[in-house]
Image (tube, rainbow, N blue to C red):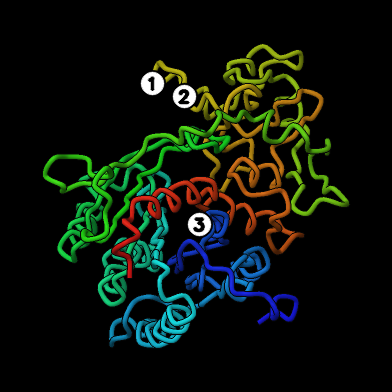
Amino acid sequence: MDRAHSSKSIAAPAFLAVDFFCGAGGTTRGLIDAGGYVMAGIDKDDRCKTTYAENNINTAVDYASSRFLNFDVFPRDEEYEAGQQDELIAKLDDLIGYYKRKAPKVPLLFAICAPCQPFTRLSRKKLSDKRKKGREKDRNLLAQAAVYVERYMPEMVLSENVSGIKDPKYGGIWEAFRQHLDTLGYVTGSKVVCTSKFGVPQFRKRSILIAVRRELVREERFADMLESELLVPESDPNAMVVTVADAIGHMPPIKAGETHIDIPNHRARTLSELNLKRLSSAKPGQSNAYMATTEFGDLTLDCHRKVNERLNNKCFTDVYTRMHPDRPSPTITTKCHSISNGRFGHYDMSQNRGMSLREAAILQSFPDDYVFYPTDQIEPVARMIGNAVPPRLAKYFAGYLVSSIDGAHAR
């Protein structure tokens, strides 16, 4: 225990938690902000370890950092030697047992937010055989996570993924996971929500699945008379809509290719002279039709012109454009640093650049002091930010789950 807190009485968290597929810690940050104690985050990608451990300090029990467990959740067998299920179960047995003894009446929450790449349109590009096999394996992550739910039977489960995960072409993975939880004795609810309705300054549609053990659910949280489904809120009634200007307007100006000397991750990607001309001609919120009539001439991309002519329609209208200051941002992706990959230009016309990594993190609802490592690189940090669950979204649904439990019956 931290010496600074050794003489204090143990602060009881609202819940204990394990964050499966934790990445850089967006879900964990939200769970801690909701008053939970995150015992560990689990991810097989150790590139997230420093970012995760440095930013997620618990505020209860022993005030320790959430542990980053670098494990593969699948079992090891002849066809998949990388599996580490036995080792992970041994570690979780120790961790969960230890903290349940320290906080015996505190409910347990499993956050299961599997990687979304196998369920997005962007994943349709041609992949190597190795990556194809990896994607197919990733599609089984939810089913594999259910093994851990069955072993530990947490009072609550929270899962988040892209809205498209419910599409039948993915084999009913989302519904199968939900049905598995139902057979284990949970009441579940699922809905597609927009993060902008939960105080996140971003339009980002996500599938949410929540589950509570049947014997613990408060009566008013059932969605139907048969008590077979949980209510899933579509918005946070206490949250205001946050615009891009509201969220990042306080950030000091920088130039394309520049890194702020005092603010970690406040760095913008370098732009070519041609793209600087394009962006200098773009007004906030408008489409890229402006490129045909700039003061520098027609700057439309040849490939776009050909596609538009062939389809007799305007395509790719958001690339090389600026965000609208008075609306939430577009969905922050792993390419959010690139103006050629979406409406990611800064709204301030005096700043001819794409958004900085720091600004992208803020639009994902990370706090300003959440530092992503390595701080001297763009691509790895953008990947962590774009793949993250918005902390504010995780915070809301964790709090909602805790309030759905009848405390008198919790173990």
Q: Secondary structure at mark 2?
A: loop
Residue 107 at x, y percent in the picture: 39, 66
Amino acid under disc 1: Leu
Question: Circle 3 is placed at which residue position?
Answer: 27
Dot 2 amino acid type? Cys
In this rendering, the label closer to the viewer, 1 or 2: 2
Residues packed near mark 2 inside 10 Å, few (<14), some (14 to 19) or many (20 plus) = some
Foreground residue among 87 and 91: 91
Question: Is residue 159 rendered to the left or right of residue 343?
Answer: left
Of pointers 1 and 3, the one earlier in the residue sequence = 3
Q: Earlier in the sequence, mark 3 or mark 2?
A: 3
The residue that mark 2 highlights is: 315
Residue in the picture at 55% in, 74% down = 68
Viewer-side residue, 239 vs 201: 239
Task: Say above or below: 396 vs 182.
Answer: above
Name the quarter where the N terminus is drawn: bottom right
Q: Secondary structure at mark 1?
A: helix
Look at mark 1 in the image and give the residue it sits on: 311
Density class for disc 3 (Cα within 10 Å; few <14, some 14-19, many ≥20) is many
